[in-house]
Image: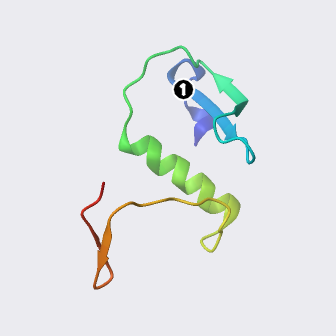
Amino acid sequence: IISSIPRENIAIYIKAQNEKNTSLYDTLYTLNQDKYMIPASNNKLLTTSAAYLKFGGDSTLFKTNFYGQVEKGILKNLC
């Protein structure tokens, strides 16, 4: 899919967070990183699809924190 999109229409900036010092990041790859683009849900779908294909649905590689209260299995009062 990506190979059919002109490179000037793509902006990619991939950073890895340092495990021991979470304020440090290593830049892994950039493409048109200074180009302003409008974020879109389509970008999120593409990124999520790529991660799913690479790591699978049962991956625990990434952790997402939610801050709120769980009531009857439903996350409420999200901060």
Q: Measuring 67% from the left and 25% from the top, which residue is drawn there?
A: 30
- The type of residue carrying mark 1 is Ile
Between 62 and 72, the one lying in front of the other is 72
Q: Is residue 60 depicted above or below 4 in this figure?
A: below
Kindly identify the residue that appears in the image at 71 percent across and 29 percent down: 29
What is the x, y in percent for residue 41? 37, 44
Residue at 55% over, 30% down: 5
What element does badge 1 sit on?
loop
* Residue with the mark numbered 1: 10
- How many neighbours does mark 1 have within 10 angstroms: few (below 14), some (14-19), or many (20 or more)? few
**What residue lies at 59% left-to-right and 71% top-to-bottom?**
57
**Which image quadrant is residue 15 in?**
top right
**Most distant residue in the top direction:** 34
Viewer-proximal residue among 64 and 14:
64
Residue 54 in which image quadrant:
bottom right
Numbered label tally: 1
The N terminus lies in quadrant = top right
Horizontal side, residue 40 vs residue 17: left or right? left
Say which quarter of the image contains residue 71. Answer: bottom left
Q: Position of residue 79 (x, y in %)?
A: 30, 54
